[in-house]
Image (cartoon, rainbow, N blue to C red):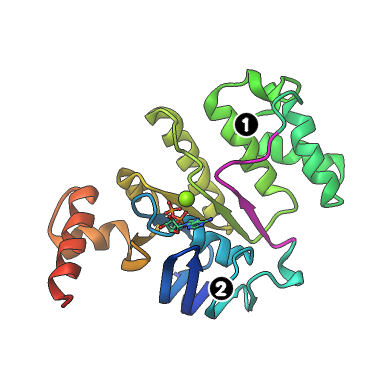
Amino acid sequence: MLGAMTSAVTIRGLRVRRGRVQVFDGLDLDIAAGRLTGLIGPSGCGKTTLIRSIVGLQIVQGGDVTVLGRPAGAPELRHRVTYSAQNDGLYRDLSVRDNVAYFAQIAGLPGSEVDRVIAAVGLAGQAKQRADSVSGGQFRRISLAIALLGRPDLILLDEPTVGLDPVLRADLWDMFARLARDGVTLIVSSHVMDEASRCDDLVLLREGQLVAATTPAGLLAETGLADADQAFLELIHRAEGVQP
Ligand SMILES: Nc1ncnc2c1ncn2[C@@H]1O[C@H](COP(=O)(O)OP(=O)(O)O)[C@@H](O)[C@H]1O
Ligand SMILES: [Mg+2]
């Protein structure tokens, strides 16, 4: 065990409004470096807004978001932080490799880097196939390969497993865990509570409120429940209990 855990992301007093919705109204949160953190909560709780705030794409009304020691969105972070959006802009009529190569070219990275990330996500055998001809799980891994370009320190993935069957979801989570073990910080969102057990750390959100910042073991220990789904609900009920 290393000494004090360093934070990859520090959020203080974050306030974000989207349309008429006050999504965050003073959110405080720390996300540890070198770990796989799950951002978990039901649809509309603010996962995408939080990810966009960390990447520096979100207009915020107030507060501070510090990423790898810099303000979110700072130019120095451009090659250190990558983000895969919910609706990734992949070209379905291009090959797997050309999709990755397109983003590599924008980032000024060589072809060797394209081959490295394709191999890292296990798509070497599908590199020449059209993106729309690979399986659903393989298609998601194209986005992951793109996120790996340039060896970033922090990778944010917005609901990368949505719509996949349990086996493919498990495969992807294994891959995320492996990356975190190699020292990358991953922040992965999901609205599926049973994916919580796959994470090192958990950020549980509901309606823009932090329900808990914990670990899978901590979640179960705190509630005395054996099931992450029930434990999350229990914490929500408790939070409602203490609110006026
Ligand atoms: N472009 C937008 N305009 C207005 N409201 C939005 C917009 N995007 C998101 N919201 C609202 O902000 C809240 C948080 O949304 P979001 O961050 O997308 O949640 P999640 O990713 O957890 O589903 C929701 O209430 C949603 O309706
Ligand atoms: Mg979302």
Please provide the residue range marked out in magenta.
Answer: 79-90
Number of disc labels = 2
- Residue 3 seen in this snapshot: no
Labels 1, 2: front one: 2
Is residue 150 placed above or below 128 in the rendered structure?
below
x then y, percent, for residue 72: 63, 72
x then y, percent, for residue 101: 81, 38
Q: Quadrant of the N terminus?
A: bottom left
Residue 81 painted magenta: yes
Reading the image, the residue beneath label 2 is 60
Q: Tell me the kind of residue under disc 1.
A: Gly
Q: Determine which quarter of the picture holds residue 30.
A: bottom left
Foreground: 177 or 79?
79
Q: Circle 2 — which element?
A: loop
x then y, percent, for residue 49: 50, 60
Which residue: 21% across, 62% down?
A: 236
